[in-house]
Every structure is written in C-alpha cells, then in structure tokens.
Image (cartoon, rainbow, N blue to C red):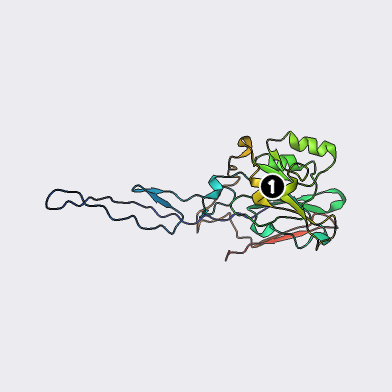
C-alpha cells in the first residue's frame, strides 16, 4: 500500500501574443517565450499543461511518465534480501503475504528510473490480479508453472529472467537466492507495442491544503502474521 501524495498546485496561465509594427509597416520578430520552470512546455505561443505521473499525482518534470508503461518488479523481503534496492523510488509498492506468513513486494516503477531493482524473486498466485490494472511489464525470477501460466494470461508483458536474461545480473556481494538484480532501463527497452501505454491513475489526488477525511493519520501499522509486520509513516517534507 502507499499513502497518496498531493499534486503540486497548478496556477492558471495565459500567454498574450503581440506583434510590433515599424514605421514602415514591416513586422518585427516577437520576443522569445520565457523558459518555464513549473513542468509546463511552451511551444508556438501555447502552454502545455504539466505532465502528472498517473501513479503519484506529482508533476513529472521529464515527461517520461506519458511515454512509457508501468514496470512491476517482484522483490524479496527476507532478512538476507535487505537492504532492497529501488523500493524508495518506486511509484507504488504493494506488500503481499506469501507462504509461511512472510511478505514480498511488488515495486511499480514508472515516473522514476532506478539504476537497479531487487533482489528479484518468483511469482505468486495473487500477482496477476495486482498487476492487471497497471498493464505494462512484469519482472520476476520464475515460479511454479501454474502461477507463471496465470500471469501470462493477464494483460501484461512477461519479462522474467528467462525471457529477458540480459536485463538481469547476479550480485556477487549478496547471498543466493537473494541476489538477482534487474535493470529497469533494459526492461523498458523490451516493451512491445501492445504493452507500451502508460498506466491509468489508480487513485484520486487531493489538492494541496484540501482536507483528507475527518482526521489526519501520520502512520499505519499492519501485523501480517507472527513472522511479519509493517509500519508506514507519512513524511510531509517529501
């Protein structure tokens, strides 16, 4: 789960175009449009609205969120898998309970590109339903045939290690099997046309200063099982 982030405030903008005439009636070149610093793009006297990353509601300065699909990566949460790589910059992080009462993550990357993500682990039966609304690509490290078959029936592109081997590496400084790392940039490069669209927004985003429910909640704790629990704290500064 992930707490919702508020989008940046958008100010109403207008550009007034004026032409200056010389005494002889000839047209003079108009002044150059000022550079924008709020995520908008100025072109031919018009203002293009900022691109909001659909999975965060935050302005995507690069505009990349409008040009690529979501990338969902199955990530380990065993003690030997920590610290994980990439969770801190994912647009969304799902935490799921697997066998034995322990948990694993599905980190969804879209507006931000980490150098690596991992350690990557195997698919589970709940994964197809989690990633189906997002579409795009799904990275994992195998699984029992029944679960793999379920994922391949979902509206996503399978880019597991057997399909996209060159986009993965085994980290030598980590213990097996907690050392498989994925390269998001290389995985995105494999996106097929049918799986290249950006994901839809999964949430509605409140405007800055808008009340959120009847009371503020700074944190939430989830006792999944006697073997696993999680705590999430809201960081207003970020």
Residue positioned most to the right: 100
Q: Where the C terminus falls, by quadrant?
A: bottom right
For label 1, count other residues whose C-alpha is less than 10 Å away and answer few (under 14), some (14-19) or many (20+). many
What x and y, as percent, mark residue 44? 35, 47
Residue at image position (32%, 51%) is: 15
In the picture of the structure, the residue carrying the numbered disc 1 is: 72
What x and y, as percent, mark residue 119? 77, 55
Residue at image position (81%, 61%) is: 174
90 sits to left or right of 165: left
Residue toward you, 233 or 73: 73
Quadrant in which residue 144 is drawn:
top right
Residue at image position (65%, 57%) is: 114
Quadrant in which residue 58 is drawn:
bottom right
197 sits to left or right of 175: left
| Number of marks present in the image shown | 1
Quadrant in which residue 230 is drawn:
bottom right
What x and y, as percent, mark residue 208? 50, 57
Residue toward you, 61 or 22: 22
Residue toward you, 54 or 211: 54
Q: Secondary structure at mark 1?
A: strand
Residue positioned most to the left: 23
Residue positioned most to the top: 153
224 sits to left or right of 30: right
Residue toward you, 191 or 199: 191
134 sits to left or right of 12: right
Residue positioned most to the front: 166
What x and y, as percent, mark residue 131? 69, 42
């Amino acid at each position: 789960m992930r707490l919702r982030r508020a989008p940046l405030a958008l100010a109403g903008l207008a550009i007034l175009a004026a032409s200056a005439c010389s005494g002889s009636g000839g047209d003079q070149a108009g002044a150059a449009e000022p550079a924008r610093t709020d995520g908008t793009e100025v072109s031919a006297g018009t203002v293009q609205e900022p691109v909001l990353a659909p999975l965060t509601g935050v302005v995507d300065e690069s505009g990349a969120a409008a040009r690529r699909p979501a990338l969902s990566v199955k990530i380990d949460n065993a003690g030997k898998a920590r610290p994980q790589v990439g969770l801190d910059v994912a647009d969304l992080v799902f935490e799921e309970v697997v066998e034995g009462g322990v948990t694993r993550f599905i980190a969804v990357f879209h507006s931000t590109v980490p150098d690596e993500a991992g350690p990557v682990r195997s698919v589970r039966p709940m994964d197809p339903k989690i990633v189906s609304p997002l579409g795009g690509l799904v990275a994992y490290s195998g699984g029992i045939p029944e679960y793999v078959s379920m994922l391949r029936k979902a509206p996503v592109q399978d880019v597991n290690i057997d399909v996209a081997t060159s986009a993965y590496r085994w980290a030598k400084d980590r213990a097996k099997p907690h050392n498989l790392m994925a390269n998001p940039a290389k995985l995105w490069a494999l996106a097929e046309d049918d799986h290249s669209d950006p994901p839809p927004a999964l949430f509605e985003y409140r405007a800055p200063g808008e009340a959120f429910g009847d009371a503020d909640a700074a944190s939430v704790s989830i006792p999944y099982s006697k073997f696993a629990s999680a705590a999430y704290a809201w960081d207003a500064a970020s």
